[in-house]
Amino acid sequence: MNIDGRDNEFAQAQSAGLASGSPSEETLDMGASTGEGVIDAHIHLDLYPEEEREPLLTAAFAAGVEAVIAVSMQLASCKLNRSLAQRFGSRILPAYGFHPEQPLPDAAQTDELIAWIRERAVAGESFAIGEVGLPYYMRSEAEAAGHAFDQAPYLALLERFVQLAAELDRPIVLHAVYEDAEQACDLLERYGIARAHFHWFKGPCETIERMIRRGYHVSVTPDVAYEQEIQQLVQRYPLELLMVETDGPWPFEGPFSGQQTRPEVVREVARHIAAIKELPESHVIAVLSRTTRLLYHIE
């Protein structure tokens, strides 16, 4: 989830994104405009109200969404995403981790989470590591208010998750933007991680070039419709390293203003990528979906 310096970010995502109405008729029409399925590469299913989760997913799959990557906030979130994956099978790939834009867990909580993730691997379950990373927005807010912020413990926690991804040979979903992405890249290179996914990425040209050289993946959100920074990233980044995501239930602006963020919206994201790259939409959707399936070993 892209947190832009608000203490109540998760509550805001739930209330603004979910209470703001349903998608427009045009958005809902995205379902079967092509035969190729689309994949939402990053969504917070646990942040949708319980009674809305299954109807949301059922409607998305009926509308042409092939699968979703369900990222986690902490252990309770991991367990919920696991239960949804058991309910929907291969259409939900859970990612287990600890979201960085919140107070750190204590040592016992961290050990419990990592032990639980290892148990899932021993059991032969399919999953990724994530969402993990560094607290850019929380740190920026603290520093803007004149408060000191110690990022070292967050970096140490991220290193543990990178080590875990290397140990278990799992893809890792990263929340690391701007200067934080350089530190994340350092860790990925140190532990030989190839299957890295930077969600809703923003950063300088030098970091983008480094990520491209290493073959790291980036996922694009609906703000590609109206944010020049994201449009420029799409122009620069190779199509075969791009994916699409909603970061739902995070609410978006522009043509999505006032709409609930639903997995089906990734088809509209793909349309914008196709327009920016001046490529046929069907080709772009096919490449995006194939890329996501390969990265996450979705059958």
Image (cartoon, rainbow, N blue to C red):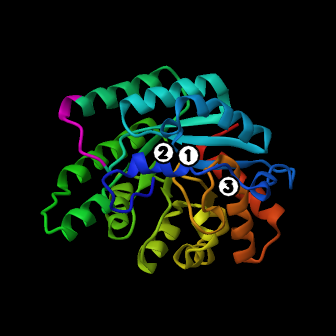
Q: CA distance from mark 1 to mark 3?
A: 17 Å
Quadrant of res 105: top left
Circle 2 residues within 10 Å: few <14, some 14–19, many ≥20: many
Residue 18 numbered tag:
1
For the residue marked with disc 3, what is the amino acid?
Answer: Val
Q: Magenta stretch?
A: 102-108
Left or right of 184 in this view: 40: right
Quadrant of res 90: top right
Residue 105 is covered by the magenta coloring:
yes
**Residue 248 in sight here:** no
Circle 3 residues within 10 Å: few <14, some 14–19, many ≥20: many
Q: Which is the main secondary structure of the residues drawn in magenta?
A: loop
**Percent coordinates x, y for residue 186 in the rendering:** 33, 62
- Depicted 51 relative to depicted 298: above or below: above
- Depicted 136 relative to depicted 90: above or below: below
Q: Residue at x 73, y 44 (%)?
A: 65
Which residue is the site of mark 3?
266
- Mark 3 and mark 1 in contact (Cβ < 8 Å)? no
The mark that comes first in sequence, 1 or 3, is 1
- Report helix, strand or loop for mark 3: helix
Residue 14 numbered tag:
2
Q: CA distance from mark 3 to mark 2?
A: 19 Å
